[in-house]
Image (cartoon, rainbow, N blue to C red):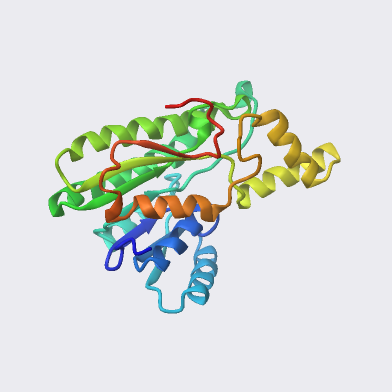
Amino acid sequence: MDLKLTGKTALVTGSTAGIGFGIAHRLLQEGASVIINGRTDDRINSALSRLRQSIPDCIVQGFAADFDFSDATSVQRLLETHKAVDILINNVGIFSPKPFAEITDEEWLYFFEVNVLSGIRLSRHYLPQMLEQNWGRIIFISSESGIQIPAEMVHYGTTKTAQLGVSRGLAQQTAGTNVTVNTVIPGSTRSEGSEKFISDLAQEKGLSKEEVEQEFFDKVRPTCLLERFATTDEVATFVTYLSSPLAAANNGAALRVDGGTIPTIL
């Protein structure tokens, strides 16, 4: 299927692995030019090598920038180097289980900076340009944890809820234009982060990874109709469609790719 993305330029944050890498790969397959982002040059170069090996004629480049504001100049350099894009995928994010009473103010701020303010800063730069050219796509990658806040990750879930509000608020500014702003809500997805999460739990409990994964869906995500982790490609395929001109009627929405985990109709 031709998603009519040839000639479009996309910036995908947090895209050296996981869902972000999958999105970059799918966009490149559809003919878009892609800027990938990671925290270090080594991770970026590794991702670039894999993408170019998979899609030899792709147009892809990378930019190292850290969104925890420990070096705010790196984000500014990113914006100065890539002054305009057609598609912005706000994917960068962090998560870590921790009891609520043990989460410090500094950790709350760190999660908010990376998971929420990163997308705000980039959208503040790129949205006015998209409105001026009367075409653009901004997509926030949230999580079903933003709807069903996990007791073991209240700080993470809260930031993912915040993304829903930011996205809808920005979409309000696009009325009557060919610019759209949406949020995608993945469920449990097999990625580098989730693999580490399962491996750590398996080691802690003295169980196999398969046993821990089954226990996870039986007890932690019992409403998941998929009854397995989604693949990054399954999520990326949907995001790529939403990035395309074919998705013009999708705007201001929170769209699920959660395997039926959220047990509500709307």
Q: How many marks?
A: 0
**Res 15 seen here:** no
**Res 259 seen here:** yes
Q: Position of residue 95 (x, y in %)?
A: 57, 39
What's the residue at 33%, 36% (across, down)? 167
Which residue is at the front of the view, 260 or 202?
Answer: 260
Q: Quadrant of the C terminus?
A: top left
Q: Quadrant of the N terminus?
A: bottom left
Image height of 135 relative to 30, above or below: above
Q: Position of residue 201 (x, y in %)?
A: 75, 40
Q: Position of residue 129 (x, y in %)?
A: 18, 52
Q: Residue furthest front?
A: 1
Query: Where is residue 17, by image quadrant?
Result: bottom right
Which residue is at the front of the view, 94 or 51?
Answer: 51
Image height of 265 relative to 197, above or below: above
Judge from the rendering whether residue 261 lies leftward or rightward of residue 213; answer left or right: left
Q: Residue furthest right?
A: 206
What's the residue at 31%, 63% (across, down)? 5
Judge from the rendering whether residue 7 lies leftward or rightward of residue 155; answer left or right: left
Which residue is at the front of the view, 210 or 11?
Answer: 210
Q: Residue furthest top?
A: 101
Q: Position of residue 227 (x, y in %)?
A: 66, 39
What's the residue at 29%, 61% (across, down)? 82
